[in-house]
Amino acid sequence: MRFAYTLGAATVALLAVSATADADEVVLKYATLNPPGSAVTREWNLPWVEKINQAGKGALKIEVFPGEALANNLNVYDRVLADVAQMAWGIPIYFTGKFKLTNVPGLPFLGGNAEAQSTAFWRLYAKGAFGDEYSEIRPLVMIGLPQSGIHMASKPMRTLDDFKGTKFRTGSKIAGDIILALGGTPISIQVGEMTQALQRGLVEGVIMPWTAFNPFRLDEVTHYHVDVPFGGGPIFIFMAKKRYDALPAAAKTAIDDNSGEAASRDFGKWWDGEDKKTRDRVSNLPGHTVVTLPKDEYDRWAARVQTVLDEWGKSIPGGGEVIAQYKQEIANVQAGH
């Protein structure tokens, strides 16, 4: 009886220790906003979270909530601040007025693939180039998406004259300003209605990266494509600063060791792979034409669009300086620095 009692007491003690350890483990909900079956969820988000969970085992566990189970593109910022989700995917252009300087990756003709842009994007944040735009949140990974090009239902776009009277779907002020500068007509249409707008002839073309083709079936409704660097656009994975600051040291370390510049560069590289994969696939489809501009025509387009860069730089305090820093950091990455 005495042995049984001692064994039972030891078991209770072990369970108590185990319960205490479990209670000390911080659980964070991650709202990805991407469908569970999407490539970005399967190939990047889930492996990234698993690395953090392994690094923080016993101290931290991130639970992934794909799609819009916890938030959507429009309310995710507020949902994170309200602690509905503790970590989330965010597209700054949807957070009206909060991230003006942060939108620099969406500007045209600044160059760089997604790897270079994402690295430069993080470096600017780390230097404090975006001022107080990050006073409420802490970004973990920052992505400058692959460059957007022109994709037409059928009409070839070879010269500036081809823009006259041509209607383009645009989803941001920058994209609309680009089309206006080139002589076209921008029409604001939600991204979910883009494919139908092309099918119905409401617009003749769109400005989008190759990575948008699979989710929106753009290869079914566009056939003439121009590779031109009309800007990528920013995305970040973020937490509320107060929530991050409250984490125990072991949980912070697990996150920090798998975030920052290295993770941003890695995610940018992943996007470059998706971009190339889709471009190659569409290029080989019957009835599709993919072109690059001759240098003289490229220079004409770039000169016309320079007004968009100039206006953006003047309209936002510090805008011109951020453009210059971003271009320099892209050049640094491309030079191997």
Image (cartoon, rainbow, N blue to C red):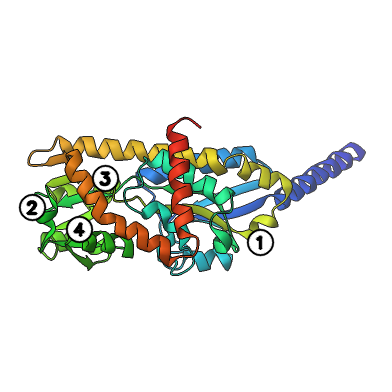
Residue behind mark 3: 210
Q: Amino acid at mark 4?
A: Leu
Q: Secondary structure at mark 1?
A: helix
Which residue position holds label 2? Answer: 155
Separation (CA) of disc 2 from disc 3? 18 Å
Image side of residue 329 versus residue 172, left or right: right
On residue 227, the disc is none
- Mark 4 Cα-neighbour bin, 10 Å: few <14, some 14–19, many ≥20: many
Q: CA distance from mark 2 to mark 1?
A: 51 Å
Q: Front-most of 22 and 252?
A: 252
Tell me the distance, in whole angstroms, between the alpha carbons under discs 3 and 4. Answer: 21 Å
Q: Residue at x 26, y 59 (%)?
A: 178
Give the mark nearer the N terminus: 3 vs 4.
Answer: 4
Indicate whether 192 appears above or below 235: below
Please state which of the two labelled residues, at mark 3 or mark 4, is closer to the viewer: 4
Q: Which residue bears the numbered disc 1?
A: 242
Tell me if label 3 and label 4 are in contact, CB under 8 Å: no
In this rendering, the label closer to the viewer, 2 or 1:
2
Q: Residue at x 44, y 41 (%)?
A: 330
Give the mark nearest the N terminus, 2 or 4.
2
| Front tag of 4 and 1 | 4
Dot 2 or dot 1, earlier in sequence: 2
Identify which amino acid the numbered label 3 is placed on: Trp
Measured Cα–Cα span from mark 1 to mark 3: 37 Å
Q: Nearer the viewer, mark 2 or mark 4?
A: 4
Whether the residues at callouts 2 and 4 have beta carbons within 8 Å, the answer is: no
